[in-house]
Amino acid sequence: MMLVLFAFGLWLLGWWLNSRLASGPQADTRMVRFLAPLIFGLTIIGIWELLVRGLEVPLVILPAPSVIAVRFADSLPILWADFVQTIIKGALSGYILGCGAAFLMAIAVDRWDFLRLGLLPVGNFVAALPIVGTAPILVMWFGFDWHSKAAVVVVMVFFPMLVNTVAGLREATAMQRDLMETYAASYWQSFLKLRLPAAMPFIFNGLKISTTLALIGAIVAEFFGSPTLGMGFRISTSVGQLSLDMVWAEIVVAALAGTAFYGLVAMIEKAVTFWHPSQRG
Amino acid sequence: MKQVFAILTVIAAIVVLWYAACVPMNIKGVLTEQERAGAEVQPPSAKDRRDMSEIGLTLDNSFAIPATWAQDRPRLPAPHQVAVELWETTVLKKITSKRSLIYHAWVTLSATMLGFAIGTGLGILLAVGIVHSRVMDLSVMPWAIVSQTIPIIALAPMIIVVLYSVGIQGIIPKAVISAYLSFFPVVVGMVKGLRSPDAMQLDLLQSYNATRGQGFWKLRLPASMPYLFTSLKIGIAASLVGAIVGELPTGAVAGLGARLLAGSYYGQTVQIWSALFAAAILAACLVGLLGLMERSVLKRMGMAQ
């Protein structure tokens, strides 16, 4: 009971700290913008720990963060092997293939108006469908190993990437295109020097959406069959064995991988589109 | 008009490619069946055929091409096989039948809608809180944004099993997954929408001596509608994926996800494809419905583009 009261006190403390920060004189500095979510996150983890211990929640329902951390530290080799199998082999190779293919397709779609008129609505339509459902088919075709996961990822990222890239390639204004024309620029010159740079914010938007989709595709595809390795496999088997601390450890890995992947793409975006108003602020 | 023609051409091209792809995909299985039925197959030994390329086999055995579109359990079913299966399991079956796709789609749809309603409601509430409270903005909003980069769907199997172990099963666990998947896109979109009125408009309300509540109901909420609908469309698609994935880990007996899983266990490819198309049609209907609502609401509010 004491621990439950402690949890309540911790909540009040965290809230008080953050409201002090938010209404204090430095409310708009980077420090506060970084500190406030950190305090909030730590408060949540603290409350989680105290409540689980205080209410004696069984391990099979919700393990305490400390238990998860211990499990995480103990099974680093397994987690690393799963990470390599799912993220590096499955998600990343599929991501590169899918985004690359979508980019090339987008150039073709942009070049021929007929394709744009016909393929873009279809692409928009397909982008909203539950493509994860193709996983059982692709697992059947490409086997249980990472190739089928990469194939699922390719299908998942292709259409969002295509739609975004095509929208980006149309971003340069008529005035700018006319200017290139007056310079007697060829198609590829005006493509490389004007339209591709102008499309970059859109392309990176598509790339960023695709990072999450790639991880979702690679993990969910493993629910339909995988070698005895991989994050989706580990999650589904650990759930079956009711060792939820392992499941949470995998989810921590997924969360870290997801944010790192996204952050990496966002960093490249910052370097490439430094000229764009949204990056100059 | 030109656009309709273009779309139809692209769809026709996809169908033609699909039929063409069926031939090399299914030729090996077909040749084995034909050989058993007594037909003469080139080359005659199964071992040689295994090492040959699919294209070469097709060229040598062109008589078998029609059979690749009519196999019982093909690797890639032809479009008409999927269409026939869809027709038989929707229109010709009674909806109460366990083999009716409408029954399975309803199981998935009900979980999706329940979860979507909960997720959207909570998401809008949190967005209102974030816009009006500086503390919440600073502490919660970064996490809501980060959550968009995490494959939170990985939590799905655990939620199903944990809720099962405390005695909750059926529609609720799937709805929980649908709810949290639609929750975060709605929060992020709605915060953007509620913040979309510019300083000039906020100042105008201030000069009218409007209260915060009035400012919310008369300016912020109406201004957020286009953003809300955009995120609702993302949210409902995510909800549907959540409900489908939620049906996988427990070996659920009903629902589109269960159909996918059962099909993949028993090699019933036509069943997988028809379930997949049913899911796609369901998603398209849901998103289309939201699109219609968006159009009529924005039109009435005078915001239609």
Image (spheres, grey):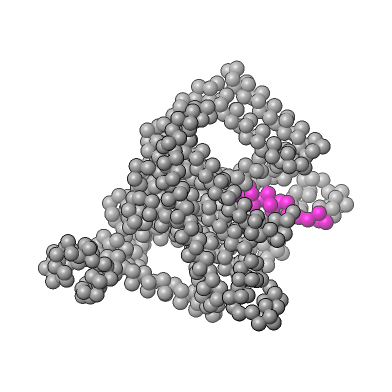
Along the line of sight, which residue is nearer the eye, B162 or A222? Answer: A222
Query: Can residue B163 be seen at all in this image of the molecule?
Result: no
Prevalent SS, magenta region = helix
Q: Name the side, left or right, on which B216 lies relative to A64.
A: right
Q: Which residues are magenta?
A: B184-201
Verify whether residue B195 appears in magenta. Answer: yes
Query: A245 above or below A278?
Result: above
Quadrant housing residue B33: bottom left
Residue at horizontal 76 percent and vertical 41 percent from the top: A29
Residue at horizontal 23 percent and vertical 70 percent from the top: B57
Q: Could you tell me residue A5's position as x and y percent?
A: 62, 20
Along the line of sight, which residue is nearer the eye, B303 or B156? Answer: B156
Query: A10 above or below A233?
Result: above
Q: Could you tell me residue B120's position as x and y percent?
A: 59, 47
Quadrant housing residue A35: top right
Query: Can residue A267 be seen at all in this image of the molecule?
Result: yes
Residue at horizontal 67 percent and vertical 33 percent from the top: A39
Residue at horizontal 73 percent and vertical 42 percent from the top: A30
Q: Could you tell me residue B294's position as x and y percent?
A: 62, 60
Along the line of sight, which residue is nearer the eye, B72 or A46? Answer: A46
Query: B216 above or below A172?
Result: above
- Counting every numbered tag in the picture gives 0
Q: Name the side, left or right, on which B152 lies relative to B39.
A: right
- State which quarter of the image contains the N terminus of chain A: top right
Q: Name the side, left or right, on which B178 lies relative to B254.
A: right
Verify whether residue B145 appears in magenta. Answer: no
Q: Name the side, left or right, on which A280 lies relative to A255.
A: right
- State which quarter of the image contains the C terminus of chain A: bottom right
Q: Could you tell me residue A131's position as x and y percent?
A: 45, 57
